[in-house]
Image (cartoon, rainbow, N blue to C red):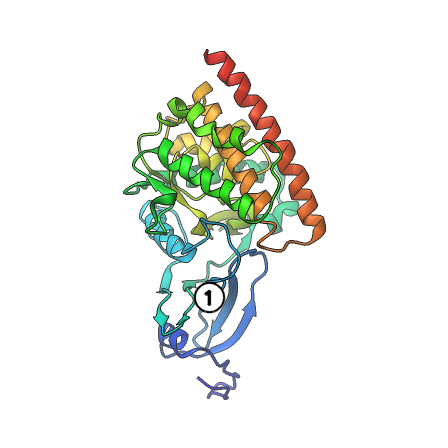
């Protein structure tokens, strides 16, 4: 496509021929950078037929990234298919362009999605009254439970052929996932709030608790309010209409979803969310072994958030906040794990 004026007077936006082929006969009349993402480049494409599509492009293959941040758009495509089959509304995948070698060059990966109309919960937070928030939290709990009904072929991250991020059982997979993040800390020179051996030993220390997970359930792991879409319902109130950005999903413990839903808090203490979850899946254990696993996943997520500040080149203020917060979070969770370990002896 070239910049030209169509019969309706719109100014067509020139796009890559591969993208044009994926879109079909319609032209792009507007392309807008979408805010909120920290990794992929996402643009809202408006077409001559009125449709709106989200075009997500991965960073260059040689861009700094954590070990698990490869092939994420393939993971998002997989997540969207499985979540939709489980009854969760997610953006429909229009096209997934996978990297390909052409001589010395390698094309980037991109994903074209139908745009899920609405606004993020995060952007509407101040307008939601307590009663409506309770209802939305129940809906979010239902959504999380439905996602977890999907089952993968193996534990761990699905996007790579490298077994370093997967395993035949959850203790093995989680141990590899944690080891990869700790290796990233070394690679990017990120200091840890406690000695690395103490963190690396956690999966072995709590192998019995991790082994309680027998099914590789689908886990979004990033369904915080910025990735939850709301829209007005027939009664005029905002309702939860879907989730986006499933690129960081993995197959593992359904309980890990509670950590991703509220990265800074403790979602298992949210009665509304739990009620919604149990309306779909009544069995959501929160016994001592489950509490230990939640603490392990909070350590894991806090490490990711701490370490990613370097390859993503966050500004100094954000980096300082993440460094301070993650140190407190990890220390608190390790203390909880120590108490739980003592209690089981």
Residue drawn at point x = 42 percent, y = 46 percent: 249
Residue drawn at point x = 39 percent, y = 27 percent: 210
Displayed quadrant of residue 113: bottom left
SS class of the residue under badge 1?
A: strand
Q: Is residue 112 above or below residue 184?
A: below
Near mark 1 (Cα within 10 A), the count class, few <14, some 14-19 or many ≥20, is many
> Residue under circle 1?
55
Q: Quick one: quadrant of the N terminus?
A: bottom left
Residue 188 pos. (x, y %): 57, 49
The count of marks equals 1
Give whichever of 106, 237 is nearer the camera.
Answer: 106
Q: Is residue 66 above or below residue 166?
A: below
Residue drawn at point x = 40 percent, y = 54 percent: 76
Give whichever of 317, 235 is nearer the camera.
Answer: 317
Q: Is residue 301 left or right of residue 289?
A: right
Residue drawn at point x = 61 percent, y = 27 percent: 332
Give whichever of 211, 105 is nearer the camera.
Answer: 105
């Amino acid at each position: 496509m070239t910049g030209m004026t169509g019969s309706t007077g719109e100014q067509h936006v020139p796009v890559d021929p591969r993208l044009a082929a994926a879109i079909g006969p319609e032209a792009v009349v507007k392309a807008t950078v979408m805010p909120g993402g920290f990794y992929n480049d996402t643009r809202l494409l408006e077409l001559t037929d009125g449709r709106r599509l989200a075009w997500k492009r991965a960073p260059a293959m040689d861009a700094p990234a954590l070990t698990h941040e490869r092939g994420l758009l393939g993971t998002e495509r997989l997540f969207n298919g499985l979540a939709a089959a489980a009854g969760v509304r997610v953006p429909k995948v229009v096209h997934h362009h996978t990297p390909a070698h052409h001589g010395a060059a390698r094309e980037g990966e991109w994903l074209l999605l139908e745009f899920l109309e609405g606004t993020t919960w995060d952007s509407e937070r101040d307008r939601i009254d307590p009663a409506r928030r309770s209802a939305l939290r129940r809906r979010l709990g239902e959504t999380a439970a439905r996602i977890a009904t999907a089952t993968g072929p193996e534990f761990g991250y699905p996007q790579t052929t490298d077994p370093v991020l997967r395993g035949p059982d959850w203790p093995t997979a989680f141990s590899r996932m944690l080891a990869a993040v700790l290796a990233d800390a070394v690679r990017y020179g990120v200091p840890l709030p406690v000695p690395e051996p103490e963190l690396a030993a956690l999966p072995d220390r709590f192998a019995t608790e991790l082994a309680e997970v027998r099914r590789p359930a689908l886990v979004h792991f990033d369904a915080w309010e910025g990735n939850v879409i709301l829209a007005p319902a027939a009664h005029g109130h905002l309702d939860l209409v879907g989730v986006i950005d499933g690129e960081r999903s993995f197959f593992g413990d359904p309980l890990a979803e509670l950590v991703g839903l509220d990265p800074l808090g403790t979602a298992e203490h949210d009665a509304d969310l739990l009620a919604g979850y149990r309306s779909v899946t009544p069995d959501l254990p929160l016994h001592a072994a489950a509490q230990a696993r939640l603490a392990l996943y909070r350590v894991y997520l806090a490490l990711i958030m701490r370490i990613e500040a370097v390859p993503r080149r966050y500004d100094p203020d954000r980096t300082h906040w993440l460094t301070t917060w993650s140190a407190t979070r990890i220390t608190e969770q390790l203390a909880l794990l120590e108490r739980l370990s003592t209690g089981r002896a």
